[in-house]
Image: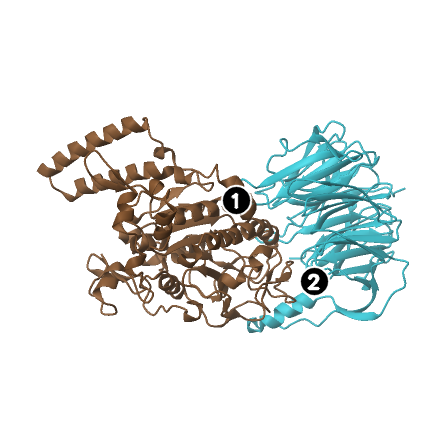
Chain colours: A brown, B cyan
């Protein structure tokens, strides 16, 4: 549905939704030989990808890692407080009880309850000047997942669906867009069900329908029978819905073969210290596994930052979970060579008010809050924008939802002005006037 | 020891203004002084007049804390002991020599807010400026995390603290030496010591939402062995117990549900400490959660405070509420009464009001000339 005749880019990249530089050079794409080596020949002669088998070969896995950029979204559901994390206001009436600590970036300090992240700031592009438009949860969640207002009534796709479309592997065993915990509310929107999220629970547990009813051999015989009957039926009744059904079934069968990847029971104990013993930490670890296996987009949600009351105990507990999980993810991605191709986004739907209310809480805030990027395409160690002395408004370099998404898409090599059509209506990946924040781009 | 009380005739004596930040802790220091701490780490001391009249100004400021004060207790009518988010426990000697005089503006927050909202047309009030003498701490004990729980044993020999590192510590009150330490799961929250010093009530919390790491518990510990005598967690499932106190005879343990609970669920529960069995549930609970509990020196009454800006007095024997002090301010956004304290003779009760006041009620004795008026702070 993208517009291949976009005047801004040449036909080939635009058709891919890719912008440049950097494009993915041909040699970085997985080779046909590698694909066949990792494939499974079916009784019908078709070859389907088998990522589980494919990654038994380290060299092939390494080749696949180079293939495309990926994205992990750490979603702070409810909206984390910028003043209590990355934009502290010591000595001001809005400060709250948390104290600052030094970071690896000289002169920049963050919350004392993010000590591990303090060592990772050299990897981070920190936007302290988000000025956004949707102050409540459903509209904020929608807006910060799509960069469009919910009230527009157009079914915009989430960031995950866009990334799945442009960076996902169409015939992979694994879904291209996986999410767990409290996450987005827009789905694939106008991109259609092919790019819809595959949702698992916050602990990484798969939904019950992913368990096969029969032993593998029986299942395969049944599938082959169905394939053959459908092929015969389609020869006599060629129509898109039948083909769509067949494609969906093939996709589901492939997923069943790869589903063991979601099982972290064996390798989690060795990673628990790094990521912290929490649902969210385990989710981050699974996200790392999934992007390593080629999943284009993984969203991991952390509940719940919506601290209209007891903001400080809420944030303190959440940060004690967040700090090891997020830093562990960055360390693990770097260690496995994936960080340069994996964009890690930390954000929620809103920030929190600088004013502390009389329930010891902070309310929703959209006039100056923080989003953090790291990894693929991002210049680390950059603090972009600022808020005023009390954090009541952006002081310099405001960033909108569209600007943020333009930055994210650019970092991932996706054209932020990619155009799609819904009926005859053109829709762009980011709203008119959105500009990537160049200072944050590597 | 205490004057005869008639809680039904309780009357507000003073609402001492101090709105630099939330007043978060309060304690009588002997019969005539009251000390309060706020969430900036400041502590002020007032000398209360014998009789009602104008609100007295504070006379001393205890300086040294660098973060919010969570609890204050007093020993020997002389030592004020404070627990803070700055990870320390500090002792202040009322007999210590006062230091340099400094100016304190008691309505600083109101002025700051009015100046910030000039566009509303409201003129900032005149500053309520007073001169106080500063005093440094006589002793500082370093902890590991926010010290949220602090209680003094009935014989005043032992302190118990609980912190957000999950550490429960017993100290020799006089010397400050550590006597016992153990660790609980999550953060230690409310703490109390039985009069015979043999048992400690400790609540635990780790206030995550929708995460399997979320944790609440309440347990009764044998202090000599640091082992659990009674685990009451199942009886108080998912409740953050914000306050605990033993009655003077040690036969009743009162605990109260905190956090921002839905509706009037900030209840007081009376337990038998010997068995851990629930004796009584006091109703109504505080709307949106309870914050503090305090036994009256007569041993027959208990005061509770909550996020509904109310202080309630309960008869322990029958569980009935005998008085309600203050007024609910209503609406979704309320202030809290953070903490309460009875004077040693039981004739007065002080309450730390988040809105920026220390309220002092006459609850018995000294009735002559009492000014039976009420004040609302909304």
Relative depth, front residue between A191 and B45: A191
Can residue B132 be seen in the rendering of this structure?
Answer: yes
**Element under disc 2:** loop
Q: Is residue B187 above or below residue A160?
A: above
**Snapshot quadrant of residue A344:** bottom left
**Which quadrant would the C terminus of chain B be assigned to in this image?**
bottom right
Can residue A142 be seen in the rendering of this structure?
Answer: no
Query: Disc 1 marks which residue?
Result: A271
Is residue A413 toward the left or the right of residue A240 in the image?
right
Q: Is residue A229 above or below residue A328?
A: above
Is residue A399 toward the left or the right of residue A64 in the image?
right
Instruction: Give the x, y percent position of residue A251.
Output: 27, 41
Dot 2: chain letter: B
Is residue A71 toward the left or the right of residue B196 in the image?
left
Dot 1: chain letter: A
**Element under disc 1:** helix
Q: Is residue B115 above or below residue B55?
A: below
Which mark, by number, is residue B19?
2
Is residue B167 toward the left or the right of residue A364 in the image?
right
Instruction: Give the x, y percent position of residue A283.
Output: 47, 45
**Snapshot quadrant of residue B292:** top right
Q: Residue at x 45, y 66 (%)?
A: A379
**Total numbered labels:** 2
Relative depth, front residue between A115 and B89: A115
Instruction: Give the x, y percent position of residue B195.
Output: 83, 36
Instruction: Give the x, y percent position of residue A41.
Output: 24, 37
Quote the CA–CA distance across marks 2 and 1: 48 Å
Category of crowding for the residue at label 1, using alpha-carbon neighbours closer than 10 angstroms: few (below 14), some (14–19), many (at least 20) = some
Category of crowding for the residue at label 2, using alpha-carbon neighbours closer than 10 angstroms: few (below 14), some (14–19), many (at least 20) = many
Q: Same chain, marks 2 and 1?
A: no
Relative depth, front residue between B275 and B375: B275
- Asked whether the residues under the numbered discs 2 and 1 touch, taking CB atoms below 8 Å apart as contact, a structural biologist would say no
């Amino acid at each position: 549905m993208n517009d291949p005749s976009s005047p801004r880019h040449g036909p080939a990249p635009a058709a891919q939704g890719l912008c440049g530089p950097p494009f993915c050079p041909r040699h970085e794409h997985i080779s046909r030989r590698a694909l066949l080596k990792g494939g499974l020949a079916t009784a019908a002669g078709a070859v389907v990808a088998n990522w589980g088998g494919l990654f038994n070969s380290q060299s092939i896995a390494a080749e696949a890692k180079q293939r495309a950029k990926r994205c992990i979204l750490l979603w702070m559901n409810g909206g984390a407080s910028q003043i209590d994390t990355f934009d502290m206001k010591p000595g001001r009436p809005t400060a709250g009880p948390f104290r600052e600590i030094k970071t690896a970036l000289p002169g920049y300090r963050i919350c004392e309850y993010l000590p591990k992240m303090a060592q990772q700031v050299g990897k981070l592009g920190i936007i302290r000047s988000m000025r956004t438009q949707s102050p409540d949860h459903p509209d904020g969640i929608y807006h910060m997942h799509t960069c469009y207002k919910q009230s527009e009534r157009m079914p915009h796709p989430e960031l995950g669906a866009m990334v799945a479309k442009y960076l996902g592997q169409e015939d992979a065993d694994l879904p291209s867009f996986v999410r767990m915990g409290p996450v987005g509310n827009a789905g694939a929107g106008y991109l259609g069900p092919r790019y819809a999220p595959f949702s698992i629970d916050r602990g990484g547990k798969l939904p019950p329908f992913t368990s096969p009813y029969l032993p593998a051999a029986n299942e395969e015989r049944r599938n082959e029978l169905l394939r053959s009957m459908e092929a015969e039926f389609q020869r006599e009744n060629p129509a898109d819905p039948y083909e769509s059904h067949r494609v969906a079934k093939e996709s589901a069968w492939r997923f069943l073969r790869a589903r063991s990847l979601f099982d972290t029971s064996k390798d989690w104990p060795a990673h628990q210290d790094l990521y912290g013993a929490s649902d969210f930490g385990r989710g981050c670890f699974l996200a790392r596994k999934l992007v390593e296996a080629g999943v284009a987009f993984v969203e991991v949600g952390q509940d719940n930052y919506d601290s209209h009351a007891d903001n400080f105990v809420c944030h303190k507990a959440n940060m004690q979970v967040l700090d090891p999980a997020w830093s562990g993810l960055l360390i693990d991605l770097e260690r496995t060579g994936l960080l340069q191709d994996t964009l890690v986004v930390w954000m929620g739907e809103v920030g929190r008010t600088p004013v502390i209310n009389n329930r010891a809480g902070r309310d929703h805030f959209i006039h100056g809050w923080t989003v953090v990027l790291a990894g693929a395409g991002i210049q680390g160690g950059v603090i972009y924008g600022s808020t005023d002395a009390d954090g009541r408004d952006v002081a310099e370099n405001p960033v909108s939802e569209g600007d943020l998404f333009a930055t994210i898409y650019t970092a991932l090599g996706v054209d932020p002005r990619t155009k799609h059509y819904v009926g005859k209506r053109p829709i762009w990946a980011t709203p008119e006037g959105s500009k990537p924040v160049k200072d944050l781009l590597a | 020891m205490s004057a005869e009380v008639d809680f039904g005739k309780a009357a507000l004596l003073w609402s001492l203004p101090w709105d630099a930040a939330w007043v978060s802790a309060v304690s009588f220091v002997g019969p005539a002084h009251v000390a309060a701490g706020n969430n900036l780490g400041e502590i002020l001391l007032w000398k209360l007049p014998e009789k009602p009249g104008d609100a007295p100004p504070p006379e001393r400021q205890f300086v040294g804390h660098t973060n919010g004060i969570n609890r204050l207790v007093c020993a020997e009518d002389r030592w004020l002991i404070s627990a803070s988010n700055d990870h320390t426990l500090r002792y202040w000697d009322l007999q210590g020599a006062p230091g340099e005089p400094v100016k304190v503006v008691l309505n600083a927050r109101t002025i700051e807010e009015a100046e910030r909202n000039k566009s509303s047309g409201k003129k900032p009030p005149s500053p309520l400026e007073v001169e106080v003498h500063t005093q440094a701490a006589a002793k500082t004990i370093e902890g590991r995390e926010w010290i949220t729980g602090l209680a003094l044993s009935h014989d005043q020999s032992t302190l118990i603290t609980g912190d957000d590192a999950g550490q429960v510590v017993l100290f020799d009150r006089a010397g400050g030496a550590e006597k016992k330490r153990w660790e609980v799961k999550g953060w230690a929250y409310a703490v109390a010591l039985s009069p015979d010093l043999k048992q400690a009530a400790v609540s635990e919390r780790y206030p995550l939402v929708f995460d399997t790491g979320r944790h609440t518990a309440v347990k009764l510990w044998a202090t000599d062995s640091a082992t659990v005598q009674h685990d009451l967690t199942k009886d108080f499932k998912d409740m953050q117990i914000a306050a605990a106190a033993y009655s003077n005879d040690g036969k009743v343990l009162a605990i109260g549900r905190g956090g921002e609970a839905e509706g009037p669920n900030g209840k007081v529960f009376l337990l038998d400490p010997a068995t851990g069995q629930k004796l009584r549930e006091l109703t109504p609970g505080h709307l949106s959660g309870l914050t503090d509990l305090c036994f009256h020196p007569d041993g027959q009454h208990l005061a509770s405070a909550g996020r509904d800006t109310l202080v309630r007095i309960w008869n322990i024997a029958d569980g009935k509420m005998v008085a309600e002090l203050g007024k609910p301010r209503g609406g979704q956004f309320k202030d809290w009464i953070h903490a309460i304290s009875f004077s040693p003779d039981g004739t007065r009760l002080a309450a730390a009001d988040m809105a920026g006041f220390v309220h002092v009620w006459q609850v018995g004795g000294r009735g002559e000339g009492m000014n039976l008026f009420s004040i609302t702070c909304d």
